[in-house]
Image: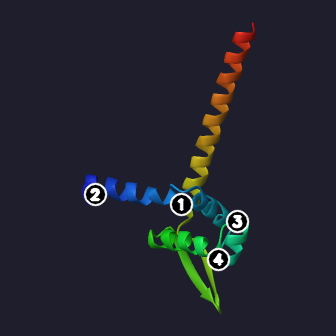
């Protein structure tokens, strides 16, 4: 695979994570598999909207399904996705903390 093709694939994969509700679903599924109904109740959107999000993520190979009786269970397709999500959340938390510290220093300087 050419480097350009790999970067294109990477960009397409990352588009999966451009919706806050999809990220919330990923975060929820880090705790284990869930049904559509379980996910819908947890994130507070309609069952139809939840199904659309899950299907999109499944088509991008981010999620896998398992059928048991009349229920379909969703889970992350790879533990590395959960790890990547955790790393991004740590990075965002770190950035927020740095921003808060910088604002605090700036405010103290103004007050002096």
Alpha carbon separation for disc pair 4 and 1: 22 Å
| Residue that badge 3 annotates | 44
Residue depicted at 64% across the width and 75% down the height: 47
Calculate the distance from the C-alpha at mark 2 to the C-alpha at mark 4: 34 Å
What colour scheme was applied to this rendering of the protein?
rainbow
Q: Earlier in the sequence, mark 4 or mark 3?
A: 4
How far apart in space, not on screen, are marks 3 and 2 (Cα)? 37 Å
In primary-sequence order, the first of circles 1 and 2 is 2
Which image quadrant is residue 108 in?
Answer: top right
State the residue position of label 1: 80
Local SS, label 4 = helix
Q: Is residue 55 left or right of residue 67?
A: left
What residue does disc 4 label? 36
Q: Nearer the viewer, mark 2 or mark 4?
A: 4
Give the residue at x 44% y 68%.
60
Report the residue marked by disc 2. Answer: 5
Front: mark 3 or 1: 3
| Residue 90 horizontal side relative to residue 3, left or right | right
């Amino acid at each position: 695979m050419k480097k350009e093709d790999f970067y294109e694939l990477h960009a397409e994969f990352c588009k999966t994570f451009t919706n806050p509700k999809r990220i919330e679903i990923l975060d929820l599924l880090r705790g284990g598999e869930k049904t559509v109904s379980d996910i819908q109740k947890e994130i507070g959107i309609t069952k139809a909207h939840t199904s659309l999000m899950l299907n999109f993520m499944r088509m991008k190979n981010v999620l896998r399904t398992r059928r048991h009786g009349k229920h379909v269970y969703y889970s992350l397709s790879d533990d590395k996705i959960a790890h990547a999500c955790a790393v991004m959340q740590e990075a965002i938390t770190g950035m927020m903390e740095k921003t808060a510290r910088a604002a605090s220093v700036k405010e103290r300087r103004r007050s002096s």
